Image (spheres, rainbow, N blue to C red):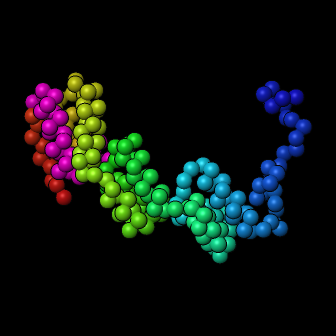
Amino acid sequence: MSRRSGQRSDVADGPTPGSSAAAGPDADPVEVARAIVLRQLTNGPRTRAQLSLALRRKSVPDDVAEQVLDRFSELGYVDDEAFAHAWVQSRQVGKGLARRALAHELRQRGVADDTARAALDTVDPDAEREAAQALVRRRLAGMQALAPEVATRRLLGMLARKGYPAGLALTVVREAVAHDGSAPVDVDLEIR
């Protein structure tokens, strides 16, 4: 019977053939680690720290994990610099994130500070400002019914969550609200 009808198939339940679970306790730890890393990388790029954590969770010995990760790095499959640059590019363009938010995300993924800094240095301040302006324009279009001070507060909050500095956020929002034709709003902000 087919699985669609809710009936079990004739195939016995158990681990997938060739998986680390199917290998059992006598499995070669290097092969187990290699399979874990390959599976992780199949799901998308990962940092060395993320892969190391995945191996630790699967109880792979540290020396074996280092050996496997060194080999994957040597082959170019694990490259934190390339990961950081690609991450910054995609998240800045796709989500409109500013440097501060991008730095936080890279730190969460275990990218070293100097590697993250090098990737963040590629962010053009003008492009960051343009991204903030585009975010505000898009959001402001749906806020026509709101009072200018409410719209301003919400826009500033959105930009703050995306990591934009308070000074830049305030300038961009004031310009957008003024251009929109709403009454200018004087916002008292404590810029830190």
Q: Position of residue 171 (x, y in %)?
A: 15, 44
Q: Residue at x 12, y 27 (%)?
A: 181
The boundaries of the magenta stretch are: 157-183
Q: Position of residue 18 (x, y in %)?
A: 80, 54
Relative depth, front residue between 103 and 185: 103
Q: Residue at x 26, y 27 (%)?
A: 141
Examine the image and state in which quarter residue 147 appears: top left
Say if residue 160 shows up in the picture: no
Q: Is residue 30 above or below residue 89?
A: below
Examine the image and state in which quarter residue 69 appears: bottom right
- Would residue 184 be found to the left or right of residue 54 on screen? left
Q: Residue at x 14, y 39 (%)?
A: 174
Q: Residue at x 28, y 32 (%)?
A: 139
Q: Position of residue 163 (x, y in %)?
A: 30, 51
Q: Is residue 11 above or below residue 52?
A: above
- Would residue 93 be found to the left or right of residue 37 on screen? left
